[in-house]
Amino acid sequence: MKIIIACVMMLAPLAAHAQLVKCVGKDGKVEYAVQCPTGVKEQQTGIRNTKEGPASSTKAPAQKSTAEREADFRKRQTDQQASATKKEEESKDAEARKANCENARSHLAALDSGQRIVRNDPVTGERSYLDDKEREKAVVEARRSVDGWCKP
């Protein structure tokens, strides 16, 4: 018999799921408790106190630690710096393409105009003028250059 009583006493706290009630006093003071004191009006709330606590049905998102938040902040900073650097490089490339396009177009315009074009010999340093065959080759090369640099 003592063993049965001991087992019941040990299991009783495990099954202690209580319902919270609203206790309204004579002066209008409201308290919430498992049991209302005598002389107080008791109202059912439908709130159950479970073993896991009030957050058992809806789990709140876990708070990040300070180190995790700091790491996230630093990652955002490096991402922003990388995107700013990439944009800067793209704008420099666009400016260089534009300058090369303008140079290629002006060279082609000079070739098409019929002006005498002078080239320096890289070995001897002597100046020489383009003849008709060389001019045709230079025009073809200049058109390729314009097509390569002046893409929309």
Image (cartoon, helix red, strand yellow):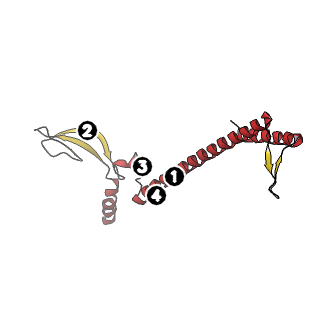
Number of other residues with Cα within 10 Å of mark 1, as a class: few under 14, some 14 to 19, many 20 or more: few
Left or right: 89 as drawn, with respect to 35: right
- Looking at the image, do the residues carrying marks 4 and 3 touch, with CB atoms under 8 Å apart? no
Task: Compare marks 4 and 1 and give the one earlier in the sequence.
Answer: 4
Check disc 4 and give the amino acid type.
Ala
Residue marked by disc 4: 71
Q: Residue at x 34, y 50 (%)?
A: 50
Task: Compare marks 1 and 3 and give the one earlier in the sequence.
Answer: 3
Residue marked by disc 3: 61
Check disc 2 and give the amino acid type.
Gln
Check disc 1 and give the amino acid type.
Gln
Q: How far apart are marks 4 and 3 (CA)?
A: 18 Å
* Element on which disc 2 rests: strand
Res 12 seen here: no
Residue marked by disc 2: 44
Q: How far apart are marks 3 and 2 (CA)?
A: 30 Å
Number of other residues with Cα within 10 Å of mark 2, as a class: few under 14, some 14 to 19, many 20 or more: few
Q: Residue at x 20, y 39 (%)?
A: 42
Residue marked by disc 1: 81
Left or right: 43 as drawn, with respect to 12: left
